[in-house]
Image (tube, rainbow, N blue to C red):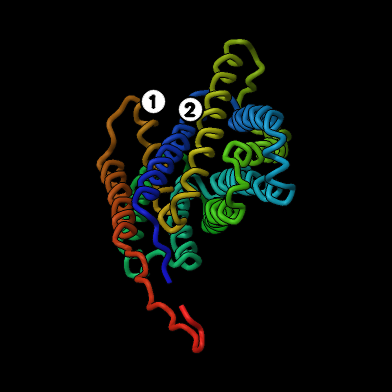
Amino acid sequence: MREHVPRTRVLAGLSAALVATALWGFTFLGPAAVDPVNVYYLVLGRYAVFGLMSAAVLATRLDRLRALGPRRAAGAAHLGIVGYIGFYLLLSMSASVGGGVLASAMTGLIPVMVMLASNLIEKVLPWRHCLLPLAVISTGLFLVNGSAGSFGTDGGRREALIGAALGFAACLAWSYFVIVNKILIRRAGPAVDNATWTACIGLAAFAGSLVLLPVAESADGASPFAGFDALWPFAMWCVALAVLGSWCATWFWNIASKRLPSTVMGPIIGMEAVFGAFFYLLWDQRTPTVSELCGGLLVITGVVLCVYALARVRPPAPGPAPAPARGVRR
């Protein structure tokens, strides 16, 4: 039997999810904003601030943390490692081996993965209603990502295959985050305090990011500690990305996870690429290409189609009242 979601919850969850994807899209500006600083230092700085914020929140919410319990807190923590650090590392490796265009295009699989796997679990939408939104969103993401030629160049066939495998693994990591985060929040029920849950994710993401320290020291790019002129804007961007792109985005996404089926949240993830392209165009001070514009409009259309399909799902009709047992008076 399919789950029915009230329309008020859909609208609230949809708004929260769109804000989260817009904030994640904002993080696309980070590497360009601190260039030529090594991007791994940016990731370390961002998650260091995220971790400090999370530790401060947990220190003031020890009662909420105890109510959450060690098992649920560990569940939230592992999502921070898999969804944030695991996804970023795998996607970076994919771009390094197979080229940035391939890695960027692979992220178009995420909405497809999440929607298919979630609908298999939740059975929210009839499968025939999933096909059109998926096709429209996938085409739009291909157009948006496929035009990002500045991300890198393709290597040979072997490198492309390895890069595709790493990109696929990155998509699995983020899809796992979206689906399992929803499941764990639903299972925890009233025990989940949004700020505490977000803080557990943030603290674990910071701990996981420490593996990038030797990578940052050996990778190409300038150090942010070369001088004050580089350190000040770098620090400001670390704070902005941590507050907006990590804490606030995760907080809003958790709100959406409480109100929306993952089947619908999958397509909405595609909006992250659209928002990212929009912010980058503003930063670059240029108009979108025909491919970028058409791709963005297709992604938006696909999300609207998916939400429309969810709105058409009717609650299950109440079954007949059970007949009273013999010999029992009402």
Amino acid type for the residue under numbered disc 2: Ala
Do callouts 1 and 2 mark residues in contact (Cβ within 8 Å)? yes
Q: Is residue 89 left or right of residue 244?
A: right
Residue at screen point 37% across, 71% down: 318
Q: For the residue labelled by badge 1, is the local secondary structure a helix, a strand or a loop?
A: helix
Residue shown at the point (39%, 43%) measured from the top left: 12
Instruction: Please determine whether, in this image, residue 283 is positioned above or below residue 231.
Output: below
Neighbours of disc 2 within 10 Å: few (<14), some (14-19), many (20+) = few
Q: Position of residue 51 (x, y in %)?
A: 66, 32
Q: Counting residues from the N terminus, which is met first, the one under dot 1 or under dot 2?
A: 2
| Mark 1 burial class by Cα count in 10 Å: few <14, some 14-19, many 20+ | few
Distance from disc 1 to disc 2, alpha carbons, whole Å, reads 9 Å
Q: Residue at label 2?
A: 32
Rendered image quadrant of residue 92: top right
Residue 217 in the image: x percent, y percent? Answer: 70, 30
The amino acid type of the residue labelled 1 equals Trp
Q: Is residue 64 left or right of residue 7?
A: right
Q: Which residue is mark 1?
A: 283
| Quadrant in the picture for the N terminus | bottom left
Which mark, by number, is residue 153? none
Counting every numbered tag in the picture gives 2
Nearest the eye: 174 or 251: 251
Along the viewing direction, whichever of 324 and 228 lies nearer the viewer = 324
Task: Name the residue rendered at 59%, 48% in the picture.
Answer: 190
| Residue 59 percent location from the top left of the image | 71, 29
Question: Quadrant of the rendered structure where residue 37 is?
Answer: top right
- The residue lying furthest to the bottom in this view is 326
